[in-house]
Image (cartoon, grey):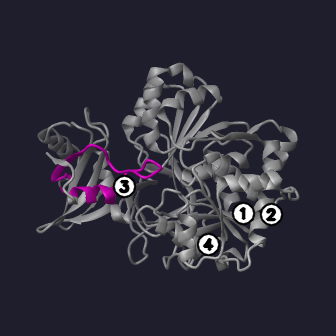
Amino acid sequence: MPITRTVLSTAAQRPAQPAIVGADGALDYAGLVEDSRRVFAVVDAAHRAQDAPPQPAPETDGIPVTAVSVGSAFHAARIVAGLAGYRAVSAVIDPQWPLAHRVHVVTAAGIGLVIGDDPALAPALRDAGWTGTVLALDEFRDREAAATPAEPPTVRDADEAFLLLFSSGTTSDPKAFLKTRRQYRANVAVSSAHLEPLPGVRTLAPGPLSYSLTLYALIECLATGGGAHLADAFDPARLASRVAAEGITRIVAVPAVVQVLIDAARRDPGAFSALELVVTGGANLPTALRDGLAAVLPHVRLISYYGAAEIGFIGDSRGGDGTLLDVYDGILAEIRDDTGARVPDGELGTLWIRAAACSDGYLAATTDAALRGPDGWATVHDLARIVDGRLQLAGRAGDVVATGGHKVSLPEVERAFDTMPGLGTACAVALPDPRLGNVVALVIEGGSAPSKAELQAWARARLAPQFVPRRWYLLDRLPRTAGGKIRRPATAALLADGEGIRL
């Protein structure tokens, strides 16, 4: 595991260095090492006590799998970190997922122990024939207090699986995949070279630990001897006070948090005097957000990175809207058509990546989808093109729609409106049309917007004719994931149900 060697050396050299800080507690590196011994002791005993333990997915090579599904980011983080130095595979399951999704991943992946507080989960798992163990967080902590500590954690074999991750969980059954320690060491090497999780740096990652961006922030901080400052839920009102009180110099968050940061800095710029870097995940960082941050906190740098949980970090942008990316050294990228042939520069196609951090594939029990091709290259079906040697993202396959014989990238439609004065957050969706097959509609969040004529004029000046929305709607609030991303299919479904005001 990439963090164990660093955790042990930091605990020896700088034992009081903060490791994990959250609403429910804090651990320095010396405390994290000792805490991990009790975490593993309880987890190991719970697995061994089972008369008929669930069979872990074959891809784990028989290593027992433990899942954490609690609201406390601090406790979830310390359990995942605590298991890292032992023969264990850990997973974080979003407690907000539909119950059926949680039951599916637990049973399909062969998870043997779940630490979770939803009283509906244990009976639902029993009804599904699951023979594992569910422990409430309070019960787990009581067992820790009474446990004889296990032997100290050790650096494990590089090819051993240690982390079970999921590709989704909001609209369909999640696809599960494993990360080996070797793969994550490669991922940390890329992150360390470009995103600055340096020794001693205190990073605030204010999102659910079940969100891959937050989980990666935790791992990369511990892998480099930094501090991971977490939150059970993002609290805009406490952002400034936490940054000031906890000496935060680096923030890792989704782009939606940048606007909150801008607003907080306008009210209290002094609270952010020590902040040096903001790192956002996801391809689309509106230019207005980048410019807004530069205006209120000119000393703060902003990096917008692109990656996929299955593949790892791929590249980043340090200007513009975050869609023209410089691919990192050691990462290979190709754009291919539906036949697998490479397409000329400038043409849209499916992005394929070759990277040492890439997972081997999805767990067969959770999906029949393929991650890697026979040649070792991998894709999560993002669409992109090469422009002047840089990578330009156009969204996932579902983000590109056919309308009147043309292919239209919905994220590109949205980006055209990023700097329009008086316009709030917007989401482009495809709506069925009997003549064109689909038409593009722009859905605007908030109670007011520029007039329809102003919207049309703005779009026609910046978009090709087939990209100009044909319909315009207002919604009080756009649906979002727990990580703050707008849920495009859910937005379209609201319009289909008659929600929203048509302009």
Say few, some or many: other residues with alpha carbon within 10 Å of mark 1 (under 14 / 14 to 19 / 20 or more): many
Image location of residue 434, percent across then percent down: 12, 69
What residue is pinned by disc 4? 360
Q: Mark 4 and mark 3: span between their CA atoms? A: 28 Å
Contact, mark 2 vs mark 1 (Cβ under 8 Å)? yes
Instruction: Report if residue 124 lies within the magenta region.
Output: no
Mark 3 element type: loop
Quadrant of the snapshot with the C terminus: top left
Contact, mark 3 vs mark 1 (Cβ under 8 Å)? no
Circle nearer the viewer, 3 or 1: 3
Q: Which badge, 4 or 2, comes first in the chain's sequence?
A: 2
Mark 4 element type: loop
Query: Label 3 is placed on what type of residue?
Result: Arg
Image location of residue 182, percent across then percent down: 72, 64
Query: Label 4 is placed on what type of residue?
Result: Asp
What residue is pinned by disc 1? 181
Mark 1 element type: helix
Residue situated in front as seen by the camera: 240 or 296:
240
Contact, mark 4 vs mark 3 (Cβ under 8 Å)? no
Q: Mark 1 and mark 4: span between their CA atoms? A: 12 Å
Query: Label 1 is placed on what type of residue?
Result: Arg
Residue lying at 42% horizontally and 28% vertically, measured from the top left: 263
Residue situated in front as seen by the camera: 412 or 64:
64
Q: Which badge, 1 or 4, comes first in the chain's sequence?
A: 1
| Numbered label attached to residue 487 | 3
What residue is pinned by disc 2? 156
Instruction: Report if residue 477 lies within the magenta region.
Output: yes
Part of the protein shown in magenta? 466-495
Residue lying at 42% horizontally and 68% vertically, measured from the top left: 172
Q: Mark 2 and mark 1: span between their CA atoms? A: 8 Å
Q: Which badge, 3 or 2, comes first in the chain's sequence?
A: 2
